[in-house]
Amino acid sequence: MSEKHLAVIVLAAGEGTRMKSAKPKVMHEMAGLPLLGHVLATASALGAAHVVPVIRHQRDHIEEYIRAFFPTANPIDQDDIPGTGRAVECGLAGLPNDFNGAVVVTSGDVPLLEVSTLDALLEAHLEGGFGVTVLSSIAEDATGYGRIVRDSSGSFTQIVEHRDATDEQLDIDEVNAGVYVFDSTLLRNALGQLGQHNAQGEKYLTDVVTIALSEGSTVQALAVEDSWQVAGINDRVQLSELSAELNSRICEAWMKAGVTIQDPASTWIDVTVELGRDVTLLPGTILKGTTSIGEGSTIGPEVLMTDTVVGAGASVVKSHVTGSRIGDEATVGPYSFLRPGTDLGADGKIGTFVETKNAKIGAGSKVPHLSYVGDAEIGVASNIGAGTIFANYDGINKHRSTIGSHVRTGSHNVFVAPITIGDGAYTAAGTVVRKDVEAGDLAMNVAPQRNIADWVLAKRPGSAAALAAEEAKN
Ligand code: UD1
Ligand code: CA
């Protein structure tokens, strides 16, 4: 069928009361996308001419997300009348009046559904010439789901909601996934006849099936084997279970693509992350957003990395990294904190207990120990001494520091910005650098050292220190 005759309606108007959240249910995240983002990505991949999310609860928040990330989707509001049937009825208003073809309906709270499953459902629907095709699955725990009721010959007769089911119907383990394909004409006609006589006083989309059958149309339910794909999220327990399942699928796909993941259960990878060949991820690594890791790099253990680009052959250990770039063969950690705007060159090093922000550190340059580097540019092959602070803030404004190439700065320096240190310059240990240093100069402003002879013997007589000193002198 051509795309012109295919529409997808995504139900996302419900409040999601069981989440007990200020945030709408479909905006809760898993693997870096809101639930609705997963569903809209799948809907978009189906290649339909029309994708119509139906929204209501916190519509502005959801609509803003849709406009930003799925600009070709056409969100439609649901009115006061409740229920999935009413939601689809409102959604139809988002299609051209003369639209005729197949209408796929999915739910914004069923995030693991795959495009291939929808494709197969659509194909079975069109090939068999059915009026309605329902996706079902055999559930281990059917609690909360609508049950697929069949007659003695196995033919589909109705979908009954959990809250409306008889004891006998509650024993049925085939459940409605909330994913359907409808013939558009049948759907329009049946929605017009929906009542609200049920336990929830809602217009149920599931009743369209009964109406279709009573009007002589054909209905089928197709069971999907992989029941995770149709699992819906109603509360945070299910959110966590599905997140773990999605994550294990993401890890498995990367392992098959050539990434070593020592402990997938403690490694969390957003769907938006890119990994190169022979990357190794060690336990406790969390990779988020637009992060990408180049070939052969090792990340972890215990790294939280967001929106960061890492080159090839790099190593990052026990660190927190956001909005940064890490060059080829560079090393970071353990215990580094790279804040946005950090750009570490190839072969560079950001070491233990070092915090960086808006800092370009050139190729081969090192900040190995106990330092803060903020609003700075460091050239190539320079070494920053242990315990150095780039004092970038005068209490009102931030200022930049520029350090040249092949510079050697002493331990325990303070660079009071704005400051420039020329190529090849040195600074002495303990220097507070307040004036620019020319290329090749040594800067020092430490007061000359004065030793007061035998001070300990005079002021601390009889102490262990004094006795040790006397011993040393004899
Ligand atoms: C629904 C099905 C049930 C199925 C289950 C699968 C009905 C009547 N029941 O039940 O048979 O087993 O999904 O997960 O359809 N929504 C709206 N507008 C509304 C109400 C809901 O857009 O007025 C949206 C929700 O935001 C959600 C989806 O429809 O994305 C499903 O609603 P929900 O209340 O979760 O339905 P279930 O009780 O799970
Ligand atoms: Ca649901």
Image: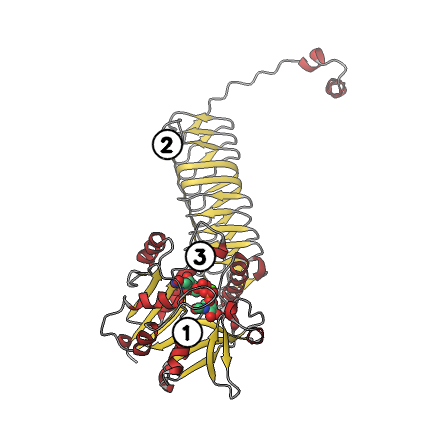
Amino acid type of the residue tagged 2 in the rendering: Lys
Dot 2 crowding, Cα within 10 Å, few <14, some 14–19, many 20+: few
The residue drawn where x is 33% and y is 52% is 60
Dot 1 crowding, Cα within 10 Å, few <14, some 14–19, many 20+: many
- Badges 1 and 3: C-beta atoms under 8 Å apart? no
Residue 2 visible somewhere in the drawing: yes
Quadrant occupied by the N terminus: bottom left
Quadrant occupied by the C terminus: top right
The residue drawn where x is 36% and y is 81% is 131
Give the image location of residue 347, x and y in percent.
Answer: 46, 49
Q: Which tag, 1 or 2, sits closer to the chain's start?
A: 1
**Visual colour scheme:** secondary structure
Amino acid type of the residue tagged 3 in the rendering: Lys
Mark 3 close to ligand 1, CB under 8 Å: yes
Give the image location of residue 58, x and y in percent.
Answer: 37, 53
Between marks 2 and 3 in the image, the one whose residue lies nearer the viewer:
3
Q: Which of 341 and 418 is in front in this view?
A: 341
Disc 2 to disc 3, how far (Cα)? 41 Å
Q: In this view, does 417 lie above or below 353?
A: above
The residue drawn where x is 45% and y is 46% is 364
The residue singled out by tag 3 in the image is: 25
Helix or strand or loop: what does disc 2 sit on? loop
Q: In this view, does 356 lie above or below 24?
A: above
